[in-house]
Image (cartoon, helix red, strand yellow):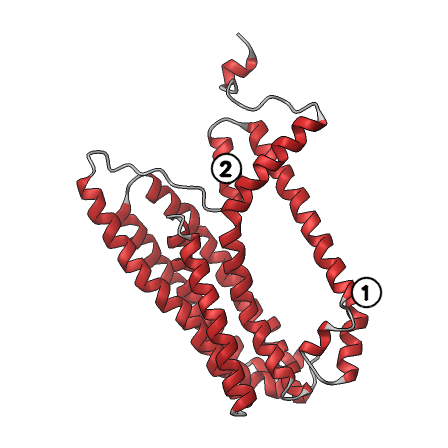
Amino acid sequence: MTLNTIFGYEDDARPRTKIQGFLKDFWVESKKLWYLASPAIITSVCQYSLGAITQIFAGNIGTSQLAAISVENSIIAGFSYGIMWGMGSGLETLCGIAFGAGQLEMLGIYMQRSWVILNTTALMLMFTYIFATPILKIIGQTDEISEDAGTFALWMIPQLFAYAMNYPLAKFLQAQNKFMVMAVISVLALVFHAFFSWLLIAKLGWGMAGAAVVLNLSWWFIVLTQLLLEVWYIDSLTLLAGYLKNAEISVDASTICVRVSNELGAIHPREAKFSTVVVGITSLLIGLFLALILIITGKQYPSLFSNDSDVQELVYTSSLHC
């Protein structure tokens, strides 16, 4: 009896020794990972692009407005985004386990508890929005930028509570492998956001107020649409569970991390290790590709955010050093 048999590794992949076998297995594993990751990537890119599009239109208003919105997005909202994302991520495991064990009623309970926790956290984080102006002055921002960013931060308080509602909803849907639905919602939100940003900021001249209105509405559109789906999904799942003799449903892989944990759970350490290698190599290649694009278009893309030649030159110089 071998050690592989003793530890349950007999159906794990054999060590890869030939380059042909490695490339073949790399291609197979890449297809699995991209199948899982593509909708999640689309969702993340679209949601991140909401703020980027706002900054693009803000750059056409003026340099000061662009700076103010950029500071609010990166420092005030970025700080809150990171906290909400981190706290919401803890729900992913709980929802995945509950869904996999057929404990469908616990999905809603976990999500509601998370709503209470995150909205309470949002109430505390709200003070960073209220006192954004003095905070920005303390960390070295100019008075003009601090005043404008502080005003914009007050207008963006609804977005903070959208964050608190969004992440539990997202983890609830991810636990059921509803990535494609989330991607569609995010794409629609991005399209609406781009159109109304153009309408309110560029066409009607609402300025920073228009940017705040559109950004808040876009995030709440995502939240409310996902909430409607959540109600429909949980009712459907509960109804289906009543007709199953064995109310045990296997949870699908929801992220690349879950892909690795699935292999470890199945006692496939070599497959888990190989998945990690594939993710690492793929991420490196994507990073190099994007860096190459930024280098090639270094003198062109800053014009998307500002018409000021000094700002464009500064962005170009900074991108070279980054």
Picture quadrant of residue 136: bottom right
**Where residue 65 sits: x, y (%)?**
63, 86
Residue 258, labelled with which disc?
A: none
Which amino acid, mark 2? Ser
**Where residue 20 sits: x, y (%)?**
69, 27
Quadrant placement of the C terminus: bottom right
**Mark 2 lies on residue:** 261
Residue 321, labelled with which disc?
A: 1
**Where residue 18 sits: x, y (%)?**
70, 24
Does residue 298 lie above or below 145 as drawn?
above
Does residue 99 lie above or below 198 as drawn?
above
Picture quadrant of residue 169: bottom left
First reached walking from the N terminus: tag 1 or tag 2: 2
- The answer to whether residue 156 shows anywhere in this view is no
**Where residue 117 sits: x, y (%)?**
39, 61
Q: Please report the residue visible at 29 percent of the width from the left and 41 percent of the height from the top.
A: 102
Of residues 305 and 66, the one nearer the viewer is 305
